[in-house]
Amino acid sequence: MSQAHRAAKAFLTQHGRAPLGVWSAPGRVNLIGEHTDYNDGFVLPFALPHRIAVAAAPREDGLLAVSTISDNGRAQRAEPVAVAELEPGTVTGWPAYPSGVAWALRRQGFDIGAAGGADLVIAGDVPAGAGLSSSHALECAVALALLGLLGHELDAGGAPSRQEIARWVQHSENDFVGAPTGLLDQTASLCCTRGNVLFLDVRSGAAEQVPFDAAAEDLAVLVIDTRANHSLADSAYGERRRGCERAAELLGVPALRDVAVDDLPSALERLPADLGPLARHVVTENARVLETVSLLRAGKMAQIGPLLTASHESLRDDYRISCAELDVAVDAALAAGALGARMVGGGFGGSAIALTSTALLDDVRRVVTAAYAEHAFTPPRLFVAVPAAGAGRDEAAEDRETDQNEHD
Ligand code: GAF
């Protein structure tokens, strides 16, 4: 059953009426371009078939009432909140994500509270804490549901654009939830399309859908969810971000995006020892994204492997956000013959990806699993990822079943 069906069914059970609609949004992996988004740089994500679905209907008392459905069908209900009273700090824990979206939309003039409020029931299969952007998928699906209830259907004339909604979701995440994240995850969830990676210039917003059919090249992207989630992740993210901003300031540029690869040696001479490696990562990572896109456009997918591995090394050695579980996953995948492998997302746990020939896929799975057993790590969760559809309204849940089958 698709997540849209699950959400709609649970809504009916809980509220005794059908929802007005169901909207859903996917998690993502980022092929390459890590920690470049908040440096005004380039990213190259694709949407996963895993989605968060939100079944929604209007209320009449100005409240936002949210519940989530766990895998075994049990509902977890958040305390209903008055949308008019939402301010940063008023809601904590997981309910801060949907509430923050209602708050951010209200500030843009899309006031679900003034329209009577909303009942939301959430179901999803994006693994939480796996660095696959489950919280952004949730926020994007909630944004579409609330806008939908207000009569603003995505892509219809006069509706806010997907990139505008991504910025509002970022506003909610930064200023209501309190996580200083960039624009990668929301834009991926909203703007990715089936069969493509999204080449996004975060500064200008220019976006290109680049075809990515790994199976046609006898290749596969294996996602390795390490199931590790280290407590350093939140504080280190903010520290790295501040470090990059400070480096840009010292170099006299608006963002590290503005440092050309050729100018890197002289830039490094002007930076203190703790900031140089951060700048080196961002500058070289942007260059790797551009090179990856050139190779993909030229039909040379198999040749991007070394760029993925170089990205991992840079994140591990210069940005210093890897961890033992990620390094073991990458090293084992490469030892088994993967063409390239790297950690994805914020770091200190979460997932890695490996690009491998389909012929070696089983070997890569086996060697990674064995390496985890050898290190006495929790067994990893492995799946092959194919670029799936971005966020949207689930008019006919059958549409989403297609994605689900691909992912099964
Ligand atoms: C997390 C953040 F949410 C993104 O904005 C991005 O910075 C990513 O880490 C690293 O590339 O997913």
Image (spheres, rainbow, N blue to C red):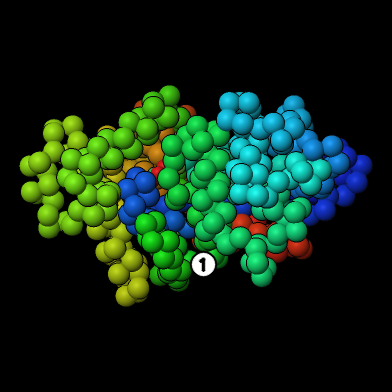
Q: Position of residue 190 (x, y in %)?
A: 56, 57
Q: Position of residue 366 (x, y in %)?
A: 42, 44
Q: Residue at x 44, y 50 (%)?
A: 184
385 vs 326: above or below? below
**366 or 394: which is nearer to us?**
394
Q: Position of residue 169 (x, y in %)?
A: 55, 46
- Location of residue 44 (image quadrant): bottom left
The single residue placed furthest to the bottom in the displayed view is 298
Can residue 258 be seen? yes
Side of 132 where 395 appears, left or right: right
**361 or 231: which is nearer to us?**
231
224 vs 77: above or below? below
Side of 264 where 298 appears, left or right: right
- Where does the C terminus fall, quadrant-wise? bottom right
Q: Position of residue 272 (x, y in %)?
A: 13, 34
341 vs 85: above or below? below
Q: Secondary structure at mark 1?
A: loop
The single residue placed furthest to the right in the displayed view is 16
Amino acid residing under circle 1: Gly
User: Which quadrant does ligand 1 occupy?
Assistant: top left
**Badge 1: how crowded within 10 Å, few (<14), some, or many (20+)?**
some
Can residue 405 be seen? no
Q: Residue at x 61, y 57 (%)?
A: 391
333 vs 289: above or below? above
Q: Which residue is mark 1?
A: 195
- Location of residue 165 (image quadrant): bottom right
Tag count in the figure?
1
Q: Residue at x 71, y 35 (%)?
A: 84
